[in-house]
Image (cartoon, rainbow, N blue to C red):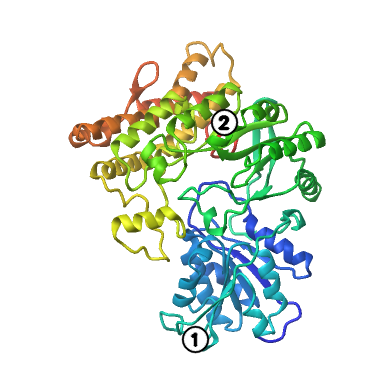
Amino acid sequence: MDTLTRPAIAFVNPSVGFSDRRKSKPIGLAYIMAYLEKAGFPSSGFDFGDSEDDAVELAALYGLDRFDVVGFSVYNESFRAAVAMAEWIRSRRPQCLIVLGGPHATAVHEHILRRHPCVDVVVRREGEEAMLELVSCLDDRAKLTAIRGTTWRAPSSGSGSGSDGDGGGGGLLVNEDRDFVPDLDQIPFPDAEFVSHSGYPDLTYYDEVQGRLKAALTICSSRSCPYDCSFCGVLTIGRKYRSREAERVVAELLHFRERHGVDYEHVYFSDANFFVSPTRALEVAEALYEADPQVTFSFGTRVNQILKAADVLPRLKERGLRFIELGIESASEPVLERLAKHVKPEVNVAAVRLLKRHGIEISLDFIMLDPATTLADIRANMEFLRETGFYDYVPHDHLYSALVLYEGTPIRDFYARRFGVVFDPDELPSPFTLFEVPEVQRFSDTLRAFRKQWQDRIDGALARGELALASIGDDGLSPGRASHARLQLDVVSLRHAPNLLTERLLADAEAGFPLLDAGGLEALLPRLGHDRVPLHDLIERTGAVAREAGFARAPGAVGPHGRD
């Protein structure tokens, strides 16, 4: 690498393939970019997170070969795309320093350098300090390859131009781990811009209490989590929990209000576990309220923490708490044990009932299936969803969810031993092909077929129907036409339809699939509405009423509790 005083630096979020989730900028890279910018090293950001375009074509389109340093943040899903881009950059600009970081790269850093000669270095765990050292001493190989928290290919094993499957040799330089950033308040706000292939929709929250749509901002107020759930990728980066001061959280909100010219009035806390310290959570809530009483917020946490801090919940609600993303995962005790949740099913139930008593909405984190799931586990899940009131919950993603075996997680090692296999570190096995019980495999295949054929139609009709309900009065649309009450029943039926189909399918599986064998998926579709019509007719009828009310097209996908 030639001597450089101000290298051209790019950070890339590679594609994980199509995603219907809300797109927001990759905050981990944004923090690194802001940290480097403060030290005098500006960089360019590229976010291809949900692009379905060819990785190499994207690299060429956005000119990734014009940079001296290119850093990729990689997950299991995006690793192949990152390698394809890195290989193309290497062929076009051999002197470019190609860096990989993120959960997947941290978990298999040695494997990456041995198998993929296009990668020069892996930055393990947190990236701010290590990346600053990297770009500061590009012209000094001895200093460069001795940076703590990095893994390199040893000089004797060749450079990035190697071509054999072992990266040109077996020697690696695995430097000692770097300490975690002790004071998160010293890291600049993640005020970095990305060139996004598909753009970022405005983030909003519909506040039912105040009856209006609010501009929303995502803020990360802490890092990591002290728990050890076996499926969680946070374990890869490390369990050392650190949090920011409440005043800095408020300062970030005010900073981005001024920076973007947007009056953000809802904060989505993206912390892995915001509620580790209920006292500190309350301090943040109080500080936000003092800054602006109109600001509301939401966060994610575990069920056991909800119960331990029950006395704090009323005050949090008074200060603007609207909903909690709750890590329930399963209602089956054997599954909870595999997931290392360290809670019993009754704790899940108690946490849900507590939040509902306080009128705090729940955003549901759930894993319906894992490779060892039995029909009894599914039955426990469905009974939980019915008994705790989640039949009205949308979106219905939780019904179709399956455990993902991320590299670096204990659950992946557990199943590798159980199956007697070695998972390829470059691959993320499909969670829908690993079921041990044949009946569960068929259950999953049929449920996925229902999702593919019907869920989008249900979502569209449901969205149009709910908009129509909001626009018409109790006296109906016009004489002789559908009443407000009937439309309400139809909308509720649409919300329940996927749950009822899942229950019918489960009962059929428990009986040996007689209905499925005789009539296929159609034989399992429930009849719905006040007059028990077929699902197709219910969708068409709801659409007709919506068209009469002026809602011929479905709006954008709406998430739980007004999040779109």
Q: Which residue is mark 1?
A: 157
In this orientation, does residue 540 appear?
no
Q: Amino acid at mark 1?
A: Ser
Mark 2 nearby-residue class (10 Å; few <14, some 14–19, many ≥20): some
Residue 262, quarter of the rendered image? top right
Q: Is residue 492 left or right of residue 316?
A: left
* Identity of the residue drawn at 56% across and 25% down: 354
Q: How many marks?
A: 2
Residue 514, quarter of the rendered image? top left
Residue 224, position in %: x, y? 60, 51
Q: Which residue is mark 2?
A: 307
Callouts 2 and 1 close, C-beta under 8 Å: no
Question: Is 143 placed above or below 210 here?
Answer: below
Foreground pick, 140 / 61: 140
Q: Secondary structure at mark 1?
A: helix
Q: Between disc 2 and disc 1, whose residue precedes?
A: 1
* Identity of the residue drawn at 60% across and 44% down: 273
Mark 1 nearby-residue class (10 Å; few <14, some 14–19, many ≥20): some
> Disc number at residue 136?
none
Residue 455, position in %: x, y? 41, 37
Residue 277, position in %: x, y? 66, 40
Q: Is residue 287 left or right of residue 490?
A: right
Residue 462, position in %: x, y? 48, 30
In this orientation, does residue 298 appear?
yes
Q: Is residue 58 left or right of residue 140?
A: left
